[in-house]
Structure formats: structure tokens, C-alpha cells
Amino acid sequence: MAKPFKLQKLTSPSKISIFTILIIVLGINLYLEQWKTPYKVFGSDGLSYYAYLPVTFIYKDIKMSFYQPNDLEIKPKFQDYPKPTISGNYLIPTSMGLAFLISPFFIVSHTIAHITSYEPNGYTLPYVIGILICSLFYLLIGLIFLRKLLLIFFNEIATSITLLSVVLGTNLLYYVSIEPLMAHAFDFSIIAIFLYVNLKWHSKINLKRSILLGLIMGLITLLRPTNVIVILLFLFWGIASWNDFTRKLQLYLRNYHYVLLIIVGFFLVWTPQFLYWKHVTGSYLFYSYGDEAKFFFDNPQFLSVLFSYRKGWLVYTPIMIFSILGIAFSFRKLKSFVLSISLYFTIFVYIMSSWWSWWNGASFGLRGFIDSYSVLSLPFAGCVSYFFTKKKIYKLTLTSILGILIFLNIFQIWQMNNGIINPIAMTKNSFWLSFGKTRIIQDANDELVFPDYAAAQKGIYYTENEITEKERLRRITQNLKTKEDSINFFKNQLSHHYQNLAIIIEKANERNITLEEMLEKDAEWLYKKRLEEITPLRFYSREHYRKSILSDSSKVQLIINKANASSESFDDLLSKEVEKLYRTRIKEFENAEYGTYEYFVHFIVCDSAYSDFIKHKAAKRNLTFERMVELDAKWLSDDFLDK
């Protein structure tokens, strides 16, 4: 007799939570229409992780002999990630774990591209959609296993709140929707699977679970090698005392053959990586980042990693404070696992703090911490469970705080996506000036301070070279003396911003012109656009010329005479004269060969009203007219360049 269908199994709070998360992520993707802007999906470090697939299946050249660092056409696809080797080949610096996970979706996308009108180059619409679906798929798998794990220790309510908070209240949401090609969200899911399989292995050791556990640990490490520390969770799982430690050691010794299977499974996953390194570099083991990126274990930036306004984990992901509190609150409930979780997370923070770029490059919050969220979900649920055993006011307070923090996280993701939050250079002033704002605040941007990368690569932080964005722009542009200098500056900026470069390549193809020609056109357009933002409006408005004419009696009389000699009215002739002067000056402006400073010198000298004003200022300050012109032109130039 068939078992009766139980509707409550489909409507459990934790399953509804997973469904809600998927709908929100899908909604973000539909709202952002990521498929229309593939250069956003194929961005940042994700390009390097992904590169194994087009290199293998499309270029069919894993030594990357086709890659030329100065080829602007290929730059958006690989950026500067490939590293030259002494053998003359180019090496993908990141490991290939993410490529393994994406490969089934890539193959389907590649097939679709071949049978449709899309170019099968690895970066067109079918591949973008494949990545978005892939990200959603692995998120679902991770949430399913995390739910199964949490329900072993906690009830439906605590599990549901934890799932919603850990995804919607953290930067994990950003990396499964806006930058889905980064490895962190995938690590979150694979570590969730590992935790569940690890628990099952400890409850009943057998061949299947041992091989599976080894393969999963190998994959986690192949995704991001620093995650090798998940081994600590396996080694110290279930240890709460010295007696537990000795029993655990005996367990490993009794089951040494299963432990060996785990090790074999681990290295089996890494075999393709070893073979790739051997083929490209001549060595089975190779540190692909070179001297440019390293760890400084003697100078960990703990306070900066956790609390700084630049990228402090608990500043931009404050909801995870409850995970840290949960380690204490859930000590009794998770007594057997507190040691392994605490040890793992302490070393995890130490590693994150010791990386030369502790701020994790351009990112929303500290993206590296996403790797630990599956592990931290256990104490998070413990914290929720603790408060839900208290009076109703505690439940209501916790739920309200979590709701506010989830809203804050989603809002700040929106801010990040709209350029209100800077991904690298936030400071205390810029953080609070932009807090809660729905538009870019210029004062906040002026307070941005970019890291000193050269010093950071030596393990030195917060040097005098870390200056505000306003000062940085002033230094960059102070040598732009001519129009040609300015246009070359814009060309350089465009060609080194890979998302912009991808757009320019598309435009060049649409117009059937060379990339260099398109760069020149866009750079010149930017030059004119930036100047026009202030010049016609502030100095050459039609109202300015109208007032200038009406204040000059000889010009007024000339227009009156023209009106008397024709059938046109004074007002019509005045409007024509204003328009003529306005258009003439704009034409002069457009054809000028001046840089910003020279242009403003020219403007001051040629505008009689402004010249009189400068003469008055010069006399008042006991300066020569020429010196006052220099000072005012420099001020106007700096003010313009800041804008």
C-alpha cells in the first residue's frame, strides 16, 4: 500500500526558505538583465578560473601560445591574468576546480552556440546564461545539504532563519547573482556537502563515504588552495576533551585503510592540475602567483580584516556577528564540534589576514570569508536556537535585528552595483557620507583612499602614498597640459578598464572600424563631454551673452538700428545675436587644442568681465595680474578635473 502524501513535507519552513532564496536570486538576475552585459559576468578573478574552459575547448592550446599581453582584442577575455613562464608559455594562475564544476554547463552552452547564430567563443549569450544557471544550481545543491546538516541539530525554525540570514544577509548573495563566476559561492556549496558527508562518515565509516569524502576535500582545495584547512574539521570533528582526542586517534589507526582511501581520493582530484603544471611549466608543483602575491604570516592584519571601513568583514557583513556569538551560546548543543569549528575559523582568519591584499581586491565586503559561511552556519543556528528558547521579547528582538541586517545587506549590494559604495577604497568618512544614500555623493568619493599596492606586495600597509581620491586625481591629471595629453589619458584609462574595453570592441565591430579608431573616438568624446559639463553651462550660457549684450549700450544701439532697418523685432534680433555668440564660442571650445589648465588661462584672458574680476582680486592680494591668472586657472582646472 502506497504511503499517504504529506503536504507538510513540501511546506516545511526550511524548504520554503530555500525556495524564497532561489526566487530572490533569480529576481536579481532578471532585474539586472546580466545576459545583456556579458562583460559584467566575465569579470574580475572569475575570468582566470574560467579561462581553462575556452583555452581547452575553443583555442585548444593550454600553453596559450595565442595570448599576447598587448593585444587589446583579447584583453577582455583574459585580462592580465596569464603569467609568462621561463619556457615561453603562458600559465593560468588560479587552480582549475571551478572549471571542473562549470564544465557541464559550458559544454551545453558551447553546443547551443554552435547550433544557433551565436559565436561559439566562450563569452557570448549562451555561455552567460549557462553561468547564471550554473551558479543557481550549485547554490541550490549547497542549501539542500546545509539544510540536511542543520536539521540534525536544530529545529525547522532555527534552520530556516539561518538559511535566509546566511544567504540574504551576507555578501554571498552578491556573488551568486552579480558576480557568479567567482569561486567563493561554489566553495560555500561544496563545503556544505563536505560537512554533511563528514558527519555521515564519522557516524558510519565505509568505502563509499571514504572515497567521496576524499574527492570532496580535494575539490574544495582545488577550488581555492587556502581551503585545505577544511582538513582540520575532519581531523578534530567530535573532539571535546583529551579522551575524545585519544579515541579519535585510535579510530584513525583502526581504519587506516579508509583514511588512505581519503588521501587517494584527495590527490586524484588534483592529478589534472599537476599534469597541467608539468605540461606548461615543466614542473608538477608550481606556485603560479610568483613574487607579486604572497602571504605575510608575520604581519597579519586582524583588525583591518575584521573592522576596517575599507573592507572589514563585520562592518560590511555585520549579521555574521551572530555566528561568533553562537560559538559560545551553542557550546552545549555543539560541544563535540566547537573545537574543530573554532580552530578552523581562527586559522581561516589568520590566513585571510596574512594575504598581501587582505582587502581581497575589488569586492563587496571580504569575499574570501564566504568560503567559511557553511561552517559558520552551525554556530549561527545555535545562536538563533538559544534566543528562541527565551521569552517572546528575545525572539522578537532577534528576528527584528536579523530582518534589518538582511535589508541593509540587500540595499548595500544595490549601492555597490550602482557605484555608491567603492569596492576598494572606502574610508570612515566615505562610508558614513554614502550610508543610506541612493545616489553617488561627490564628497564621499573625494574621501576615498586607495591602497598602496606596491607597498602591500611587501607586506607594508597604510603608507603615506595612500591618498584621497581627490588628491589622486589631481596628481594624475596635473601633467595634462594639452588636449592631446588629455585624450591620451582617457585612451589609457579605457584600454585598462576591461569592461569598458569590451564595450568598445563591440562598438568597433558594429561600426566596422578598428579598435584603435574606436578608442580614439571615445577618448575624444570623453574629453569634450567632461569639459562641456561645466563650460557651456557655467561660463557660456545663452543668458550670459544676453546680459553681456544688454549691459553694453553700443551693442544695444546696433541691434536697435538693425531692427529699424528690417521687419524683425528687437527681441528676435537679440536672440539671434545671443545664439551666434553662443555657437561661436562653443565652436572655439570644440576646436581648441588646449589642455584644461591652458584652456582656463585662455578663457580668463579673453573674457573682459572675468579679466576685470581677476585684476580686482590681484590688487586686493598684492599679486600681479599674470600670477592671479595662473592661480585662478589652476583652481578652475583642478575643480573641473575633480568633477
Image (spheres, rainbow, N blue to C red):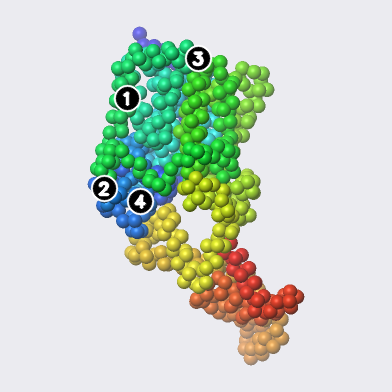
Amino acid residing under circle 1: Ile
Compute the Cα span from label 2 to label 4. 16 Å
Q: Is residue 381 above or below residue 21?
A: above
Q: Where is residue 230 in the image (x, y as percent from the top left)?
A: 42, 28
Which residue appears at 52% of the width and 68% of the height? 479
* Residue 464 visible within the image: yes
x and y, in percent, of residue 93 in the image: 35, 44
Mark-to-mark CA distance, 4 and 3: 52 Å
Mark 2 vs mark 3, CA separation in Å:
51 Å
State which mark lies toward you, 1 or 3.
3
Three-letter code, disc 2? Lys
Q: What element carries label 2?
A: loop
Mark with earlier residue (1, 2): 2
2 vs 3, front mark: 3
* Mark sitting earlier along the chain (1/3): 3
Secondary structure of the residue carrying numbered label 3 = loop
Q: Which amino acid type corresponds to the residue marked 4 in the rendered image? A: Lys
Looking at the rendered structure, which numbered label has been put on residue 77? 4
**Mark 4 nearby-residue class (10 Å; few <14, some 14–19, many ≥20):** many
Q: Which mark is nearer the camera, 1 or 2?
A: 1
Q: Examine the rendering and report whether any part of residue 616 can be seen.
A: no
Q: In which quarter of the image is residue 571?
A: bottom right
The image's mark for residue 63 is 2
**Mark 3 = which residue?**
241
Q: Which of 137 and 558 is in front in this view?
A: 137
Q: Which of marks 2 and 3 is nearer the N terminus?
A: 2
Q: Does residue 546 lie above or below 191 as drawn? A: below
